[in-house]
Amino acid sequence: MAADCEFSSFSSQSEESSPMKVQSEESSSKEVRNWLELPSEVTCLILKKLGTIEILINAQRVCKLWWKLCKDPAMWRTIDLSDLKYCRDMDLDPEKVARNAVDRSCGELVDISIEDFGTDILMEYITARTSNLKRLRLVCCCIYDEGLSNAAKKLPLLEDLEISLCSFTRESLEVVGRCCPRLRTLKYNKWGDGRPRGECDEEALAIAECMPELRHLQLFGNKLTNDGLQAILDGCPHLEYLDLRWCFNITLPGDLGRRCAERLKTLRRPNDPTHDYEFHAENLDRLANECFHNVPSDIDRSFFDDYEFDYDDFFSELYE
């Protein structure tokens, strides 16, 4: 009997000290960690990785805590509206989604990216609610000279501007240069088709005359000539990076080529590879179809006048 007790005691001790049991207990403890106990700052960083549209449509609906965090204006200092998959899947108007995101920023917005949609009316809505914007990215938007000019007049802190696959006149670029004295980066990229069609230095002259503080300039597919390039080098003395890919009116032998090599830290020449270009040449036709699909020929902008759908009211019933 005593032996049985001793064996039972030894067996019990062995089980308690068994590595397998200890490992099992550790695994169990790891499995029950509660993500809601993470510091709010950490949770916000995780949520920001999801992107603007997914936060509005999905993430904020997960729980009450995430709902409250997604209402914090600090979450909306950067707004990225370049992926419209969720809007298309749910048949939502991206302009109304954009307005909701801008409203949540409560004037703290400093960086916004809009792709495949966007109008003068939306730009007016954005600039009426923030003057702190430092970065503006517009790709394939239905925004015109007046809309860009009016926006620039309200964005004195703008440092980084991309207006790709859009078309503006020299006058509107001059307004941007005069009204945004802190502008350091400009990406003004055209469609391009792999061969030159005409020559035009109007845009290059506007950049040269009105944007003297530029450090980074990308002009993919532009029609500027050597004269326009010379003007840019004269008017932008701080320029360090210049991308002239698909600018086939440019030739860089002799003095102009040497000047570029001496002045610039990085020069992308007209025939340089485009594999690292965001809108790779072979995808331009697809982008064009996406950008202009279902755009009415008369551009009836009254469709976007009313901000009818209130996403806050729609979701607040779940958590408030």
Image (spheres, helix red, strand yellow):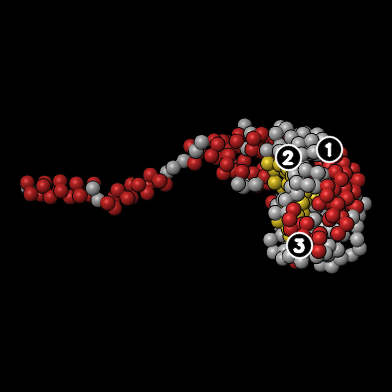
* Residue where numbered disc 1 is placed: 179
The three-letter amino acid code for the residue at tag 2 is Lys
Apparent side of residue 111 relative to residue 49 in the rendered image (left or right): right
Sequence order check, earlier mark of 3 and 1: 1
* Residue where numbered disc 3 is placed: 269
Q: Residues within 10 Å of mark 2 (few under 14, many from 20)?
A: some
Q: Is residue 151 above or below residue 293?
A: above
Residue 315, which numbered label? none
Residue 197 visible somewhere in the drawing: yes
The x and y percentages for residue 301 are 88, 45
Asked which secondary structure carries label 1, the reply is helix
Apparent side of residue 10 relative to residue 85 in the rendered image (left or right): left
| Contact check, label 1 and label 2, Cβ < 8 Å | no
Asked which secondary structure carries label 2, the reply is loop
| Contact check, label 3 and label 1, Cβ < 8 Å | no
* Real-space CA distance between mark 3 and mark 1, rounded to the nearest whole angstrom: 30 Å
The three-letter amino acid code for the residue at tag 1 is Cys
Residue at 74 percent of width and 53 percent of height: 263
The x and y percentages for residue 91 are 74, 51
Q: Residues within 10 Å of mark 1 (few under 14, many from 20)?
A: many
* Real-space CA distance between mark 1 and mark 2, rounded to the nearest whole angstrom: 13 Å
Quadrant where the C terminus is found in the figure: top right
Sequence order check, earlier mark of 3 and 2: 2
Residue at 64 percent of width and 35 percent of height: 74
Of labels 3 and 1, the one closer to you: 3
Q: Quadrant of residue 254?
A: bottom right
Q: Nearer the viewer, residue 283 or 250?
A: 250
Q: Nearer the viewer, residue 264 or 70?
A: 264
* Real-space CA distance between mark 3 and mark 2, rounded to the nearest whole angstrom: 28 Å
Q: Is residue 36 above or below residue 252?
A: above
Residue 134, which numbered label? 2
